[in-house]
Amino acid sequence: MKQISANELKARIDAGEKIKLVNAMEENKFRAKHIPGSLNIYDRPGIQASLSKSDDIIVYCTDKACNKSILLYYLLDAMGYKNICRFAGGLVEWENCGYKLDGEVVNQS
């Protein structure tokens, strides 16, 4: 499984790279808090509707202990997607780095 750190992900986002950043959590958790620019995809229909086999895809969920991004990574791989990476640190690491978050429970001040 390919992985990426918070700093590497932030650098790619800041550089304007064309990546598909995918939050693998349930819709209500995604609405509450996510990395800006993320898609919320956690099942086969969502994958087929939103992703192309040529996309550069980075999946994440809450933290290293959360298995939702692992399961999504392997589902994408089984479906023939090749450019997949996991941001294992997820929302916890992103927030601990002080990087911006979006969502209904995020303090926007």
Image (cartoon, grey):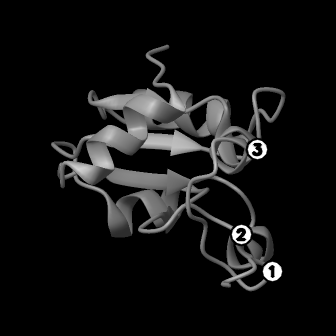
Q: Up-down: is 63 above or below 109?
A: above
Relative image position of residue 19 (x, y in whole percent): 27, 49
Q: Residues within 10 Å of mark 2 (few under 14, many from 20)?
A: some
Q: Are marks 2 and 1 in contact (CB under 8 Å)?
A: yes
Q: Amino acid at mark 2?
A: Lys
Residue at image position (59%, 43%) is 60
| Mark sitting earlier along the chain (2/1) | 2
- The residue nearer to you, when weighing 45 against 86, is 86
Residue 36 relative to residue 88: left or right: left
| Mark sitting earlier along the chain (1/3) | 3
Q: Amino acid at mark 3?
A: Val
| Mark sitting earlier along the chain (3/2) | 2
Label annotation for residue 33 = 2
Pointer 1 residue? 105
- The residue nearer to you, when weighing 55 against 31, is 31
Q: Secondary structure at mark 1?
A: loop
Q: Up-down: is 23 above or below 67?
A: below
From mark 3 to mark 2, how far is it between C-alphas? 11 Å
Label annotation for residue 92 = 3
